Amino acid sequence: MMAVVLVLKVTASVVINYRNYLPPNFSSDFLRGREGHFGGPYRWAFYTHIASGPITLVAGLILVVTASGGKFPPWHRYLGWFQVASILLLLTPSGLWMAYYAAAGPVGGIGLAILAIATATTAALGTRSAIQRRFSDHRRWMWRCFLLLCSAVVLRVFGGFGTVMKFTASWFDPLAIWLSWILPLAVFEIASRLQSRWSGVSGRRSSKTS
């Protein structure tokens, strides 16, 4: 429940900051120093990204929460298709374009580019699994996709931590970008492995006692 509240709170704070983007306020935190490349394709990528990002994140939150019981509501398929289309057609292309101009430099930009590709890949594999009716695989892939989308939330948590701790080193922002999606994925994979191992042990114990 706390995770849901955190995702919604950070998403709301991001949307509230849109007042600095329409029209663009180049003295605001995110747009500072971007006057030189804000025109042309970057402008369209930026607005596409900030419009599709919160939508795909909230859609992902609804999908994983409502499917947590192992059953998919009737409308799950339609919202899922909408989310995947938004990721593949809007979020990923715009994210890749923006990654090239990342304020965190080339290392941070590469991390953002890989994040965009990984998000699209997990969404596509999750969709393929659903079409093939491999629903267990579908759940795992879409959980990975959702965690990658949550990197925006984790990154802001890291940013707040860095501000409080007064980190000014040039390596902090690139490291935060990489950890914002690698760390949640690593925790998920480790937890999944442990759960599978525990389920296997429990199954063997049950078979011995029966």
Image (tube, rainbow, N blue to C red):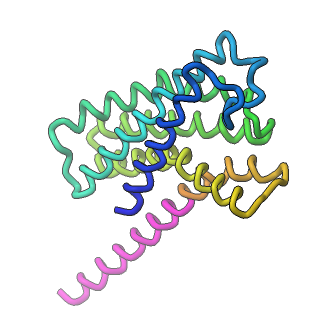
Return the residue nearer the eye: 73 or 153: 153
Q: Is residue 188 magenta?
A: yes
Farthest top residue? Answer: 40
Q: Is residue 78 above or below residue 73?
A: above
Q: Is residue 34 above or below residue 172?
A: above
Return the residue nearer the eye: 23 or 95: 23
Residue 107 % position (x, y):
78, 41
Residue 206 % position (x, y):
24, 83
Q: Is residue 139 magenta?
A: no
Return the residue nearer the eye: 209 or 58: 58
Q: Is residue 57 above or below residue 98?
A: below
Query: On the rendered image, what quadrant is the C terminus found in?
Result: bottom left
What range of the chain is rendered magenta? 186-210
Farthest bottom residue? Answer: 209
46 with respect to 90 (left or right): right
Return the residue nearer the eye: 173 or 14: 14
Callout count: 0
Main secondary structure type of the part rendered in magenta: helix
The quarter of the displayed image where residue 4 is located: bottom left
Residue 100 % position (x, y):
73, 27
Residue under the point 58% across and 19% down? 23
